[in-house]
């Protein structure tokens, strides 16, 4: 039996419509995620660092019909008791059905995650 990338859904979780060929390159040296399963595993790893975390969209900027950019903000408390606030920009490329083909994530992951590490 193949293990699930996500075992529980956080409150308010809404699944993304992700195409089979999605990937998420980042500027900060993390590996490219090239499948829905890899993206799920990445989010599970992020959630494991937090006792509580919330991500919200601040602004959405539509580009062309196949591109959209989101400015988002995150807030959370790590299992180590440290509260962090962070933000970033995600750029999505969509197929003609509105499913995500590609996602580029821009945020200062090392600065945020280093505060949560034991």
Image (cartoon, helix red, strand yellow):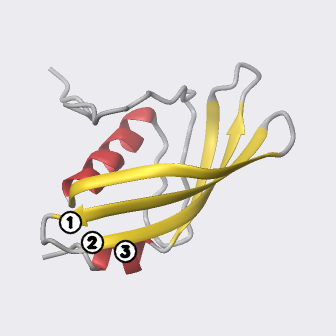
Circle 3 residue: 112
Above or below — where is 116 with respect to 19? below
Q: Are marks 1 and 2 in contact (CB under 8 Å)?
A: yes
Where in the figure is residue 51, as x and y percent of width and height? 17, 56
The residue where tag 2 is placed is 83
Name the residue at 54% across, 29% down.
18
Mark 3 Cα-neighbour bin, 10 Å: few <14, some 14–19, many ≥20: some
Nearer the observer, 7 or 81? 81
Question: Which SS class for mark 2?
Answer: strand
Category of crowding for the residue at label 1, using alpha-carbon neighbours closer than 10 angstroms: few (below 14), some (14–19), many (at least 20): many
Secondary element at image label 3: helix
Whichever of callouts 2 and 3 sits on the residue coming sooner in the sequence is 2
Q: Position of residue 103 (x, y in %)?
A: 60, 47
Q: Is residue 61 left or right of residue 52?
A: right
User: Which quadrant would residue 105 be assigned to in this image?
Assistant: bottom right
**110 horizontally vs 28: left or right:** left
Choose between 20 and 110: the one closer to the eye. Answer: 110
């Amino acid at each position: 039996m193949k293990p699930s990338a996500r075992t529980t859904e956080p409150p308010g979780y809404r699944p993304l419509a992700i195409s089979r060929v999605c990937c998420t390159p980042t500027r900060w040296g993390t590996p490219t995620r090239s499948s829905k399963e890899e993206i799920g595993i990445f989010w599970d790893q992020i959630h494991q660092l937090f006792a509580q975390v919330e991500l919200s969209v601040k602004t959405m900027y539509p580009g062309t019909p196949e591109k959209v950019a989101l400015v988002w903000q995150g807030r959370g408390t790590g299992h180590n008791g440290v509260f962090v606030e962070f933000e970033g920009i995600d750029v999505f490329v969509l197929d003609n059905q509105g499913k995500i083909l590609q996602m580029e994530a821009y945020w200062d992951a090392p600065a945020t995650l280093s505060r949560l590490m034991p």
